[in-house]
Each structure stands twice: as C-alpha cells, then as structure tokens.
Image (cartoon, coloured by chain):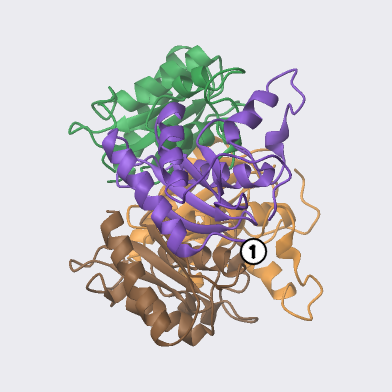
Chain colours: A orange, B green, C brown, D purple
C-alpha cells in the first residue's frame, strides 16, 4: 500500500501550516511504503542542507517503521544499533521522521521534516502525519 | 537568483495539467539555480524509476543552462561530449529537462520530467517552464 | 546571491596571509550560496587529506547557515543532531567552516579551512570571511 | 614531484587570460601528480555543471598521463578502453584535460578546463599548461 499523491500533498500542506505557525522554514519530504520519494517541498529560506536530511528522515522512518528518533536512541555509542546510519545510503536517526499509518494500521509511507530544532522538526512532521488520520504505530510487523 | 516555492508549485501544476491532458503519469522535479531540489511531485502510477531521472534531468538542465536533449545530441558515441553523463553524480541527457528563465533572462532554476516517451516528457516540461513566463533561452552566459 | 570570484579570491588571499602569520599550511575552499565550489587553494605542504575536509567544511557552513563548529556541538553522541554527518554526501562538523555574509545580511557563500588544529583552522577561516566585510551572523532565515 | 601552488596559480592565470580572449566562462582545475586537487577557479557565469567536469578532466589527465581526448578516442563503443569512465570515481574523456610536464619531462600535475566547446576547453587548457613551460608529452612511462 502506498500513500497517494493527494494524501502526500495534504500532509505537506498541514506540515507547512504548522511550520508557519511556529515561524520556521522547513524542507518536507513524503515517501511511499517502498521508501521512494512521492513529494517534496522546500519552503523559501529553508536551509539547503535540509533537503537531503528531510528525504533521509522520511526514508529512515519507512525503512524500519518507526519514528527516526527511536532509532537514534538505539544507535548511540554502546547501543545495539550503533552505526546503523551507514546503511541504506545514509540514515538520519534524530527526530523529524515519522511513518504515515492509515486508519487500518497499514504503513503507507512516511514524512520527513528538517529545517529547525529537532523538537520543531518533530512537531511539523507530526502535524503532517496526523493530517492523514493516524500516525500512532500499531505493533510490528507492518503490512506493506 | 532562485526560483521561489510559489513559482515552483505553479510550474508543477501546469506540468500536471499537461500530463493529464496527454494521459501520462509523470514525476516532476524543480531545482533552483544551484541545482538544489526545490519541489518534487510523483503522480500516482508514475514509474518509480522516473523519480531519479526527473531530478537528474532538472539538475542537468541547470548544470549547463540548456535543454537536456541538446546535451544528449553532443554526448553520443563519437560526439564531442561522449561520456559527460559520468559527471556531477550522474546526468540524464535525453529530453525532459529545461532551464527556467525569468522575464529578465535570468536562469532561476530548471524543471525535469520523466514518466513517458521523451517527446511527452519534453512537452510536459515545456508546459511547466512556460507557466513561469519564459523559457526561451537567451545567449550564454546565464546570470545566476 | 552568490559570492563573486573576485570576492572569493580576496577571501583566500586574506586566509593565506593569516595562515602564514601563524606558520601553518592550509587548504582553503570557497563555495557559493548553493554550496557549489567557487575557488580552492592548497598551500604547498598542506595535508592531502585536508582537501576534502576544507571543501566539506565550506559546504556544511552553507548548508545550515552557521559555523561548522556549532553543528558539531549538537551532533555529539547523545546530542540532538547525532549522526547528521551522514547527510549531504558527508559533513564536517568541527570548526573551520564559516558562512560568508555580505553587508546586507545575505549569505553569499562560505569558506572552509583545513590543515592544522581546529583553532587555527577557525582563525584562518575567520580572517578569510572578514575580508569580505562581515561574517557576524544575522538571525535565520538567510536570504539566498 | 608535484606542481607548486605558485605554478598552479600561474597556469590558472594564463588559462583565464585565454578564456577571456575567446570570450568564454570557464572552470579551471589544477591537480598534482597524485591527482589531488591543488587549485580551482570558477569564473563568474561559468556553468555549475563544469565544476565537476573540470576537476575530473584534470584527474583523468594525470591518471593516465595523457590528454583526456586521447583516452576518449580509445573509450568509444568497440574501442579497447570502452567504459573506462566508470573507474576512479568517474572519468571525463573528452578534450580539456592536459598533463603538466616540467622542462625535465616530469609530469608534475594536470590542468582541466570546462565551460565551452571542447575545442575552446582544450585551447584554454593548453594556454594554462604552456604557462609552465612544456606540456608536450615525452614517452611513457611518466616519472612521478
């Protein structure tokens, strides 16, 4: 199952609205359940370096079906996933990437946001994911 | 000078309209004058392999300030630019990428389209670029 | 807005002068506001390994509109941006990269210096950036 | 033996002079005999895509101790070096890259030029290499 472009754009619009509300300039990426880019939006004045980070956050969230920040907790020195960032062409494992889960518990894609503090990135990603109804994560495994 | 996100979205909307008119399913990418991604849109049912091609077409068009197909004419076996595709992380040199030039003759970015025949890709890219007023190419050098 | 080659060379000359004053051998890179290389200078006897570091520092400084060392403070184990170095083809997040900001507060590019201690790299980068009049950083967002 | 930075800059100055004389906007790269970047200069209005091509031309010329165009003759479909461009992180095998050979017949580096037709690129590279006294190539093997 894949996020539709209509859904992807709705998520981006909701994310932009939140970004403006908190006075930030974000890059916002949506990938489908295959981790392939569906839509991307760079707000004017967003950091150029955030393009790749937003996309990698979205991919990372789909790769493992969890918020990027959860992976980051496990990838610290001494942790069980230390160095996982070297896989899959480069992961980003701090907050700002969230799976997009439909109302039946199916992961249809993910959103990745970069451009401000990780708290702001996460807040904007949450606004985007929630626009599609649900991002609370059912138990693994994901049906994709 | 960089394309604004408002302009980028206008170009994408015009491209989508043309894509629908000719019954195709396209990936459409907009980059700024530094070849950095500004916006991306993958229509439902577009080829997954077209994601990277659309982005590389847009980058290629900005890299050399000309339609991608013009470079492809020069990069054939025996041609003066044979093998140029190995540069810049990979170029796409068949039609579907066009510089976006503003009304003052400044190249502000480029559009790349992939998902159908190269004729269709080029037609959709043209529709997108023209939405911003001008894509006829002034003589080199570009002011960027 | 992009740094001109005349400005880039002025920044490099000022950086070289500082490098000689403190008896170091530096690689010095200047990128424009799209993070694309504008000029590069490797002093005789500078480390070969510093070529890539100087370029990556300059790119990193433009990517996020801040001194590279500021990003490094946030990317330590346990920090909010841990692992950000995996993005954008590889970042360098210790000191030695600085945005170049013109007198109107516009970020026109960045300088990256590598070849000695990070304190020396930072001192030489500062001398280079200041040659263009201003590198004190206005509040985000950057206009680019 | 390596080209000095003083020599590299002399070659770049001579190349720029030629580029202006023929009304072109070039990227000019100098590498040492280890194929490591020594100096780089992007003239204002030069194509962004020429940055990587100029550097790859210089590296390619050193990698095999011959003008890039000579390699391109051998790398055509059916030729003995078909596909060699896939090596060494990507080669550019059309004209515009030349070894820099000192007066004792030692290859001390190379110059790579990109930004116009291959004829112009080659003419500007020749002007740069000749500024160092000799680029006529003695017989292989090169002493490096």
The image position of residue D122, as x and y in percent, is 46, 33
Q: Residue A35: name its quadrant.
A: top right
Q: Position of residue D95 (x, y in %)?
A: 53, 31
Residue at x 55% of width, y 65% of height: C51
| Quarter holding residue D69 | top right
Query: In the current view of this chain or complex, which residue is farthest to the front?
Result: D104
Q: What residue is shown at x 73% (from left), y 61% (from top)?
A: A86
Q: Is residue A6 visible?
A: yes
Q: Is residue C141 above or below residue D89?
A: below
Front one among A112 and A106: A112
Work out which quarter of the rendered image holds the C terminus of chain C and state it: bottom left
Q: Residues within 10 Å of mark 1 (few under 14, many from 20)?
A: many
Q: With A138 as the anchor, is B111 left or right in this view?
A: left
Q: Decide: is B90 above or below C118.
A: above
Residue B111 x %, y %: 41, 31
Q: In front here: D41 or A82?
A: D41
- Residue A142 left/right relative to B1: right
Q: Nearer the viewer, residue B96 or D93?
A: D93
Q: Secondary structure at mark 1?
A: helix
Q: Is residue B79 left or right of residue A66?
A: left
Is residue A134 something one can see in this rendering?
Answer: no
Percent x, y for residue D29? Answer: 48, 50
Q: Chain of mark 1?
A: A
Q: Nearer the viewer, residue C19 or A43?
A: C19
Q: Is residue B89 above or below residue A99?
A: above
Residue at x-position 65% and y-position 81% = C77
Which residue position is annotated with label 1? A68
With respect to residue A85, does C80 lie above or below?
Answer: below
| Residue under the point 42% across and 20% down | B124
Count of numbered tags: 1
Q: Is residue A135 left or right of residue A144?
A: left
């Amino acid at each position: 199952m894949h996020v539709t472009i209509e859904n992807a754009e709705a998520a981006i619009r909701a994310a932009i609205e939140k970004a403006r509300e908190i006075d930030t300039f974000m890059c916002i990426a949506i990938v489908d359940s295959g981790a392939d880019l569906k839509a991307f939006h760079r707000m004017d004045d967003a950091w150029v370096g955030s393009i790749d980070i937003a996309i990698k956050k979205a991919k990372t969230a789909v790769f493992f079906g969890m918020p990027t920040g959860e992976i980051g907790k496990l990838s610290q020195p001494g942790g069980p996933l230390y160095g996982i960032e070297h896989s899959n062409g480069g992961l980003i494992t701090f907050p700002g990437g969230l799976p997009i889960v439909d109302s039946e518990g199916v992961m249809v894609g993910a959103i990745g946001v970069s451009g401000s503090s990780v708290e702001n990135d996460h807040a904007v990603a949450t606004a985007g994911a929630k626009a599609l109804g649900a991002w609370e994560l059912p138990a693994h495994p994901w049906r994709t």
